[in-house]
Image: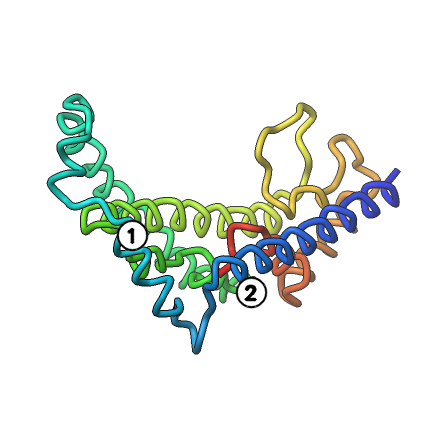
Amino acid sequence: MKSQISDLSAMIAELQGKLEVEFAKRQAELRVRLEKGKVVFDAEIRQRHRELRVGFWQFIARTRPQVLIIAPLIYSLIVPLVLLDLFVSIYHAVCFPLYGITKVKRSEHLVFDRHHLAYLNTLQKFNCIYCSYANGLISFVREVSGRTEQYWCPIKHARRVAGVHANYVNFSDFGDGESYHEEAAKLRKELRENTTAVRSTATPNTRK
């Protein structure tokens, strides 16, 4: 059974790699490339993007009134997000070295590049930065908590859990007391060697 699970995990990783290839092909079709980490478009494409941009006030006029009314509520979430970021970052910086866990690369989760798109107006770019921070932060926190779980309690649940992190598939089976301690020690060692931990970040949403 374990060999089958390992084979399926390998197949998933292979499919993710193929997905990345297809993403790269699509970016080439759209004539977008990265040069020294900076997003670059051909001049012709960038000019076309400017022509497609909807102006700020025109964009506001098209927005439903109820959306404008609840906008402050949406933006107010920045407060708990920043607090979450602060506390998790402190925990990550202090505890991971003490546990011997390889630290998470924040830059792989929080990516800000949508503001380079000329077909977005100022408000749209701001919203994209906000969403990039919120979702990138949740991804970062998820990876930190996933590695913490792998260190302290690498046991699968008895019930199916939706949206588990990538490391979860390698956890000890629920009820397998015979091999738990041996597997837990192995999983801790992998965190130090940064083998399983790296694999969990290799998902499509990390592409650039």
Kindly identify the residue that appears in the image at 49 percent across and 66 percent down: 97
Instruction: Determine crowd level at label 1: few under 14, some 14-19, many 20+ residues with C-alpha closer than 10 A.
Output: some
Q: Which residue is mark 2?
A: 102
Across and down, in percent, residue 184 comes to 71, 50
The residue singled out by tag 1 in the image is 119
Residue 127 position by quadrant = top left
Outermost residue toward the bottom in this view? 36
Which quadrant does the N terminus fall into?
top right
Could you tell me the amino acid type at mark 2? Thr
Image height of 137 relative to 97, above or below? above
Distance in Å between CA atoms under marks 1 and 2: 39 Å
Helix, strand, or loop for circle 1?
loop
Q: Amino acid at mark 1?
A: Tyr
Percent position of residue 55, x then y = 16, 46
Identify the residue at horizontal 77%, vertical 30% (top origin).
Answer: 175
At x 80% / y 35%, what residue is drawn? Answer: 176
Q: Quadrant of residue 154?
A: top right
- Answer with the quarter of the image where residue 156 lies: top right
Q: Where residue 174 is drawn, which disc sits there?
A: none
